[in-house]
Amino acid sequence: MVNLGIDAFCWHARVAAKEVDILDILDVAAELEVPFVQTTLDYVRPIPGGADAVVARAEQHGIKLQAHGAPIGRRYFDGDLDKAIAAVSEWLRETKQLGSPNLDVHSGVYRPELTADPNSYGDELDFLRRVLHGAADIAGELELELLIENASDFKSDELLSLVGEDRSLPLGIFLDVTNSLNVWEDPLVAIERLAPLSVTGHVKDFALSSNWTSDHYHRRGYTVEFLYPGEGITDVAAHVGKLVELKSGSDYNLSIEGLDSRSGIDDQLVRLRPSVARVRECLRAAETTLSAQ
């Protein structure tokens, strides 16, 4: 069964502007009647009372918490492997305090950057692999799973190489069912490859806006704009349907990631209501189709 939650990133610009905090977000999530909220650890640290206060508010609403870490790529640690492993180990301890069963991290680099320097692929993948495997022991001790997200950086085969084939290690994939489009990979293929090693992930949407020449005769290209599911052109039904097909025998947590936020604009609830309804509709339709087979 796929459970639908909300990612606190929907409020990121307003959190950064100190207009709202994770406690406010949990209150809104309760109005949306979602079972879990994904939150970056950065949103928890400034709260008076820290993780205990956040957990208490979540429990008040009957909401579970899932933890985001931060980028683990080379440039964030100046290529210092020990420093990166130590940071991830500390994030795992914070994750345990939140009661989250897993911690997801991402590279922090994007495909166009890597494409500009083809030699960087191998170096970046090697560093990420060594960080994940270096932190695997502490993840195991804490009974947590450490997940790497397909964050518009690597293709599915490259991501699978990061976690390796040893299923005894507490390593897996955080699967954003939309992001494979950003690395020019068929989403349905990527979902099929990555879902077996994934217990949670994201869904979002995007639109394309034309960049016109001055006379509006030719287009120079397109700008990709991330939106909430149901607001753009992404085939949400197909992506969610494939996920339901592959994860029907287990609980899977899928959160709406809305990266389109602005300080001073309180539009999250009004946009999330129809978006939640749309994804729930897609989930129900996929489950109905699957049960009829």
Image: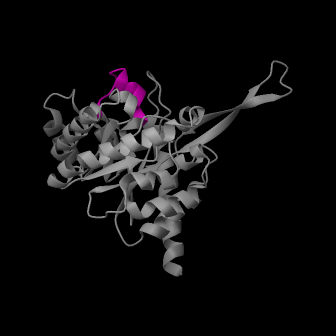
Report how many numbered discs are placed on residues in the image. Answer: 0
**Residue extending farthest top:** 214
- The residue lying toward the viewer, choosing from 75 and 206, is 75
Q: Is residue 109 left or right of residue 54?
A: right
Residue 77 falls in which quadrant of the image? top left
Residue drawn at 36 percent across, 54 percent down: 163
Residue 12 is covered by the magenta coloring = yes
Judge whether residue 142 is colored magenta: no
Q: Which residue is at the front of the view, 202 or 165?
A: 165
Image location of residue 84, percent across then percent down: 28, 35
Horizontal side of 243 relative to 212 (left or right) equals: left
Q: Is residue 24 left or right of residue 236?
A: left
Please give the name of the residue rendered at 48% of the width and 78% of the height, measured from the top-left corner. Answer: 291
Q: Is residue 180 above or below residue 290?
A: above
* Residue 5 horizontal/vertical position (percent): 37, 51
Considering only vertical position in the picture, is 137 above or below 74?
below
Answer whether residue 184 is visible to the viewer in this image: yes
**Image location (x, y in percent) of residue 236:** 56, 54
Q: Quadrant of the C terminus?
A: bottom right
Give x and y (percent) for residue 273: 46, 46
Q: Quadrant of the N terminus?
A: bottom left
The structure residue drawn at horizontal position 35% and vertical position 36%, both measured from the top left corner, is 72
Q: Is residue 7 visible?
A: no
* Magenta residues (range): 10-23
The chosen color scheme is one colour
Residue at x 44%, y 22% (from the top left corner): 263
Q: In front here: 187 or 216?
A: 187
Q: Overall secondary structure of the magenta stretch?
A: helix
- Occupied quadrant, residue 143: bottom left
Q: Is 106 drawn above or below residue 147 in the view shown? A: above
